[in-house]
Image (spheres, rainbow, N blue to C red):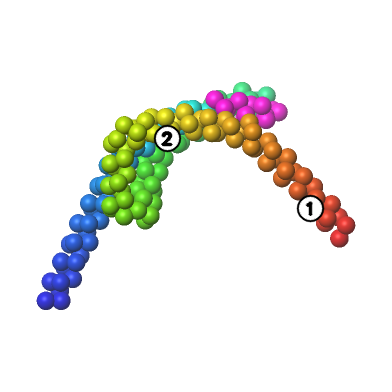
Amino acid sequence: LIFLFLLCISVFANGYSQTKQESIKELMHLMKTDSMMTKMIDQMMPAMLNQMQSQMKDSTAKAHSQEIMDIAKRTVVEMTPKIMSQTTLIYDKYYTESEINDFITFYKSPTGQKSINTMPEMMKDMMGNMMKNIIPDMAKDLAAKMLELKKKDSKN
């Protein structure tokens, strides 16, 4: 009886897990996660390339910057299945099957689809805003704080 009970629990748990995994995969499909990652990379590449070229002093490095960006993009594309697998595990860790199904309902709705379709452009805008308005101020603040620490250390 104990063996039969444990077997039933095992089958139930495995069935539950497969159902949840299938729901997470459906959610990833609805969210267009793999193509969204590609679109976000495509959107960010020009800004990243410009920033890289502006920071490079070496003309050889500048000449190869597009090549470097192409390699980076191919690497991300090659890593997409692994990223998707890890994302599935993370969703499984933090959300119940019921919550996953709530997401599925949302992403099947017109608002959910709009959210998915506008996300790459929104991310591009957010990244551009950060690069233009936040990162320079952060770098200045960090440099000032590092200078303060250096002065403090030299007094000691």
Magenta residue span: 46-58
- Position in image of residue 102 (x %, y %): 30, 46
Q: Is residue 81 magenta?
A: no
- Position in image of residue 21 (x %, y %): 27, 50
Give the structural element (helix, strand or loop) at label 1.
Answer: helix
Residue occupying image coordinates x 37% and y 56%:
93
Q: Nearer the viewer, residue 71 or 5?
A: 5
- Chief SS of the magenta region: helix
Q: Nearer the viewer, residue 111 or 122?
A: 111
Which mark identifies residue 37? Answer: 2
Q: CA distance from mark 1 to mark 2?
A: 40 Å
Q: Is residue 10 left or right of residue 47?
A: left
Residue type at mark 2: give it: Met
Q: Is residue 130 left or right of residue 8?
A: right
The residue tagged 1 is: 149
- Disc on the earlier residue, 1 or 2: 2
